[in-house]
Amino acid sequence: MKLDPITFLLNKNYELSKKFILVGGNETTLMEKICSSIIAREQSNGANLSKIEHIEDVRVEGGLFNDKNIFFGKNIKDLSEDNLNRIKNLDGTFVFYQENTAKTKKFKKVFINDRDSCLIDCYNLDRDSKIKIFNEFIKSSKKIIEEDIYWMIVEKLEDKYVFLEKSIQKILNLNQEDITRDNVNKLVSVNDSEKERVFFYLLKKNREIVGVYRDKIVTNSDVNDLYYYCKYHCQLIIDCKNEIEYNKKIPIYLFKEKSYLIGLYKKFNPKKKKLLLSLISSTEKMLRRESSLSLIAGLRFILNIKKIAIS
């Protein structure tokens, strides 16, 4: 079977009674959230957690396993249908975290078609998923958010789960009377004092870009936040087929920046969009590999976006 990750996350009582669970995709923060949630639910029912690095490490002798065991493996290289069949009769639940590769994409069919298995595929959150998650957080917090502020927040929420969750928690940690447009702007907005402002210096001289970058980006966490903000806007440029479509998708709260954003969009033809996509992809791989981008790498990323735009 195949299960939607958001359906699983938001339904705390969902019983995932499968022997083999494959958590796949390329949105690693959502994958980690799903795995930790599965493990936490099993442990709350008395299961013992064991981590495995290879399927072949799992021994098949009797007496070692019971239905209160959960085994977790991350990016296991010997994950195969034959190896799963070898341990299929053992008691316990097996959870596998596997980032997308050519091999895993083909292997996912095994988990979809087998009645004792489940595939949970994790990708960047779409708008509907963000709304579902946000609504659940609001329900739990019992906070009341005015409609215009609500939709402003939805437009700003990240498509990476971990960043989306952090933004929502910051907002809902405010006292009820403090959930105002200005306060929300301070937490998840683009304004002159925020690090995301660097994106709006792309078309200025390099020395100005470097100056504002050094002023506003001071930690690796700042670099990560800036990367995902830039990625969001770059993806809009890549995905939109024409200026009219792009204009409609510019978030309402960025009305003051609309002329700048449209001017930036006009600089990208199909060839430049491919180069931009390649830059985003290579930077994201670096982010996954090193967990956080260095300050120098973040500046290089910004300057490379500009280089593509004005080439």
Image (cartoon, rainbow, N blue to C red):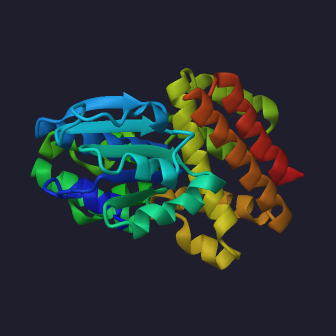
Q: Residue at x 79, y 59 (%)?
A: 274
Q: Please state which of residues 222 and 191 is positioned toward the viewer in this rendering.
A: 222
Answer yes or no: is residue 144 visible: no
Q: Please state which of residues 102 and 141 is positioned toward the viewer in this rendering.
A: 102
Q: Residue at x 62, y 38 (%)?
A: 198
Q: Residue 283: x and y, percent?
A: 68, 40
Q: Residue furthest right?
A: 311
Q: Residue at x 44, y 30 (%)?
A: 57
Q: Residue 6: x and y, percent?
A: 32, 59
Answer yes or no: is residue 273 visible: yes
Q: Residue 74: x and y, percent?
A: 46, 37
- Numbered circles on residues, count: 0
Q: Quadrant of residue 172?
A: top left
Using the image, determine if residue 289 lies above or below residue 105.
Answer: above
Q: Please state which of residues 51 and 257 is positioned toward the viewer in this rendering.
A: 51
Q: Is residue 180 left or right of residue 46?
A: right
Q: Residue at x 58, y 62 (%)?
A: 106
Using the image, determine if residue 18 lies above or below residue 199.
Answer: below
Q: Residue 15: x and y, percent?
A: 17, 57
Q: Residue furthest front?
A: 61
